[in-house]
Image (cartoon, rainbow, N blue to C red):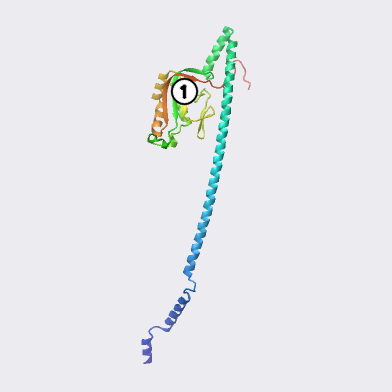
Amino acid sequence: MSLLVDMMANTLDEAYAERAAARTAGSRADGPSGKDPTRSGGLGRRAVAGLVVLALGVVTGTAVAQVRARQEATTGLRADLAGEVRDRTEETDQLAARAETLRADLDAAQAQLLGADAAGRAAAEQLRLLGLASGTLPVQGPGVQVVLDDAPPPEAGPEATLRGGTPLDGRVQDRDLQDLVNGLWAAGAEAVDVNGQRLTALTAIRSAGDAVLVDFRPLTPPYVVRAVGDPAALELELLDGPTGRRLTTYESLYGLRFSLERVDELSLPGAGTPQLRAATTAGQEDPQ
């Protein structure tokens, strides 16, 4: 009878009761004064994340400082090179002006000596024709003036809006000047210069970085190309030819500025005396 009463009063096995009591006691021990393993793990993860963020900040700051230092060094070097180019250009201009003065004195003395007799006058005329053909003598006469310039910057106004490309594509390249000069020669030009630099058979038009070099002299836009010849024929042949159509297309697509006008009288300077590398006087043996 007592066994049935005990089963009705205590429905939970004693082992289960002891385990439940032990778990309850452990939970109370881990209360406000105990350590929560979950909470400790969260603090550890937050500490690691903080260290990672700190390390990333240090690395990013170091990289930014290095980039700024390189930019400052590049800017300083570029400014130094630009200053050196300006100084060398001024020095070259002074030497060119001096050479032009000496060349004029030489031509005057030569004309005086050769004008004494008929043979001398014939030699002087032959020298004049050779000087015109080689481009070493200044010339004057009617012709055309072509202006080739970079595209205007975007902030210049609505007229600077391009139908294609970007403003960077609107810069005049050395090949554009080459194309224009060759087009003028093909149209019948007798003499051509670019920004005052007379072109000869030995003149090179190249680029160095963003600069365009004509006869190894850096030029800046706008590029003024003058050609002596029949103005009407030069204008018609150039604009109706492949060069004129190509430049007109560049003007429409990339904003390149291209204009042509007839001029009644042009004065083109002479080029420097060419340096002969292979030519020798007739009857003279090759020194090599």
Which quadrant holds the N terminus?
Answer: bottom left
Relative to 10, say whether 220 is above or below: above
Residue located farthest toward the right when viewing the structure as drawn: 287
Above or below for 200 versus 85: above
x, y (%) of residue 209? 51, 35
Residue 190 appears anywhere in the view: no
Q: In the image, 275: left or right of 22?
A: right
- Residue at image position (47%, 28%) is 223
Q: Closest to the observer: 80 or 167?
A: 80
**Residue 213: image location, x then y, percent:** 52, 30
Residue at 41% over, 22% down: 235
265 lies above or below 44 = above
Q: Residue furthest bottom?
A: 1
**Which residue does the numbered mark 1 point to in the structure image?**
226
Instruction: Please count the marks in the image.
Output: 1
**Around disc 1, counting alpha carbons within 10 Å, would you say few (fewer than 14), some (14 to 19), or many (20 or more)?**
many
Question: Which kind of residue does numbered mark 1 sit on?
Answer: Arg
The residue sitting at the top extreme is 118
Q: Position of residue 205 (x, y in %)?
A: 51, 28
For mark 1, give the secondary structure.
strand
Expressed as whole percent of the image width and height from the top left, the position of residue 47 reads: 51, 62
Residue drawn where x is 42% and y is 19% of the image: 231
- The quarter of the picture where residue 151 lies is top left
Side of 10 where 38 appears, left or right: right
Taking the image as drawn, is residue 64 in sight?
A: yes
From the image, which quarter does the C terminus lie in? top right
To which quarter of the image does residue 131 belong? top right
